[in-house]
Amino acid sequence: MYLLRKILCIAIPFTGFIAVQAQPDAMLSRQQTISEPDSDCNTQFFRRCEKVESLSKIMLLTKTQRSVSLASFMASIYSHGGEFKNMPRTEKLPELQDYGIIDLDGDGKKELVISNFTGGAHCCDEFYFFRNIGPNKYQYVAKTFGGDVCVNEKNEFSYSFYEQFGYFFTCYACTYGDTTDEAPIGTHSILLRYSKGRLTIVPGDQELRSTINDNLGKLGEQPYEKLQDATSQDNGLRKEFAMNLAVFFHSFGRNMVETQKLFNKYYKFPDAKKVWSAFVKQLQWMHKDNDF
């Protein structure tokens, strides 16, 4: 389901530097989704889930307290993608959607999880979470949007910031490239865990904090690349800064003051005010469509 659209994201060279194809890093979600179809983490997750005989017999209470069938809900979110709008739907799901019923947190109650791809070259993945409130009835709990999500065997959801910051002062497929032994460790995603009717962020530990500080220190030592105008794109350095900061912000209590201190400590370039402002605006936009 995910393989074909992932491999379409190719690097596009442009004046000023060589655009670099996404480099291997510690973010398992992107590595796994580009591998063999049968090893796709989300495909494996939904294979573990239960299915129902008819989508129309499952009723959902949406975020706006509207009661709709599972069939109607999945048809409505499928049509959000422009290139898929108004396409005929049947009980058989398209390749860009899936759903499953599974006990995510081991409390004996099963949740409903829905995945959807909205369409577009580089956007966007959606996951919806519903809790059971009665026979064949589920209530909205949370949603993730614009994050490359990978579900592991513990039913934890790795949410990548790559889609959110894909065009952060650079092209989508361009990433900071460093092949030396001292290169920064790819730190682009957080773990989300469903527990007691909520989707929560798995807190970071001291090792993650040290890794982010080390990464930002190395990135801050790189040469400054001045952008001539609003359409200019760099070599992915600013994006790498942003994704490390996004991981820090979410993993350590969403403390904007501490996140800005970290930014100020390592980003010493002349456009710091502009880059920080863009980072904050992107976080604000992202939080409008994500419930974690």
Image (spheres, rainbow, N blue to C red):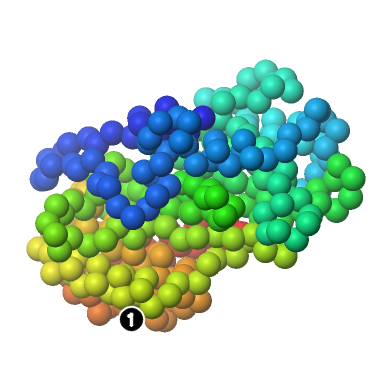
The residue depicted at 55 percent of the width and 38 percent of the height is: 44
The residue depicted at 53 percent of the width and 67 percent of the height is: 202
The answer to whether residue 202 is above or below residue 58 is: below
- Residue 96: % across, % down: 56, 30
Tell whether 32 sits left or right of 132: left
Tell whether 188 sits left or right of 100: left
| Quadrant assignment, res 204 | bottom left
Which three-letter amino acid code belongs to the residue tagged 1?
Lys
| Quadrant assignment, res 267 | bottom left
Tell whether 225 sits left or right of 132: left
- Residue 135: % across, % down: 90, 45
Task: Label 1, secondary structure: give it.
Answer: helix
What residue would you read off at disc 1?
A: 261
- Is residue 7 something one can see in this rendering? yes
The residue depicted at 15 percent of the width and 54 percent of the height is: 178
| Quadrant assignment, res 266 | bottom left
The answer to whether residue 166 is above or below residue 242 is: above
- Is residue 118 something one can see in this rendering? no
- Category of crowding for the residue at label 1, using alpha-carbon neighbours closer than 10 angstroms: few (below 14), some (14–19), many (at least 20): few
- Residue 255: % across, % down: 47, 78
Q: Check the picture and name the quadrant holding the C terminus.
A: bottom right
- Residue 217: % across, % down: 20, 72
